[in-house]
Amino acid sequence: MFIVDDQYNDEIVKFDTQDQAVQYCQDQEIIYYSRAIEYLAENDASLVDSLALAHEHGCTIDNLNSETLATILYQHNLMNTIEEDQTQ
């Protein structure tokens, strides 16, 4: 069993496979400007990390906005929380 600690939604999500956990992370989005700005302010106020991740994903400045930056950072942060449940 694999666990994702989704702090943004204040929940721990469990999956049978790592592929399911990764898919969950990739499906998550932050929508609405105000939520995106809030997430970025709390998790990357300088935008250094989110801009570097966006660059790694091949994004260019003309197709970036706060929702895209926040979503990329959110998905990255979620992926970093995937852990295998050792209690089973």
Image (cartoon, grey):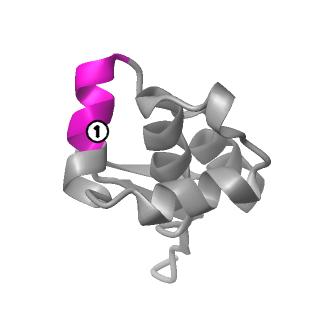
Viewer-nearest residue: 66 or 25 = 66
On the rendered structure, is 57 left or right of 67? right
Picture quadrant where residue 60 is located: top right
- Residue 19 forms part of the magenta stretch: no
Q: Quick check: 29 left or right of 19?
A: left
> Residue 30, relative to residue 61: is it above or below?
above
Q: Position of residue 53 (x, y in %)?
A: 61, 58
Write the residue at 47% across / 67% down.
81
Magenta span includes 36: yes
- Residue position marked by numbered label 1 in the rendering: 9
Q: Observer-nearest residue: 4 or 40?
A: 40
User: Observer-nearest residue: 36 or 48?
Assistant: 48
Res. 27 image quadrant: top right
Residue 68 visible in the shown view? yes
Q: Which residues are magenta?
A: 32-39
Instruction: Spot the residue most to the top.
Output: 32
Q: How many marks?
A: 1
Q: Is residue 41 above or below residue 52?
A: above
Q: Amino acid at mark 1?
A: Asn
Q: Is residue 16 visible?
A: no
Residue at x-position 56% and y-position 45%: 72
- Answer with the quarter of the image where residue 5 lies: bottom left
| Secondary structure type for disc 1 | loop
- The residue at 31%/61% (across/down) is 46
Residue drawn 76% across and 53% down?
A: 19
Residue 26 location in percent, x, y?
Answer: 65, 41
Q: Nearer the viewer, residue 27 or 60?
A: 60
Q: x, y (%) of residue 24?
A: 60, 41
Q: Main secondary structure of the magenta part?
A: helix
In which quadrant of the rendered image does the N terminus lie? bottom right
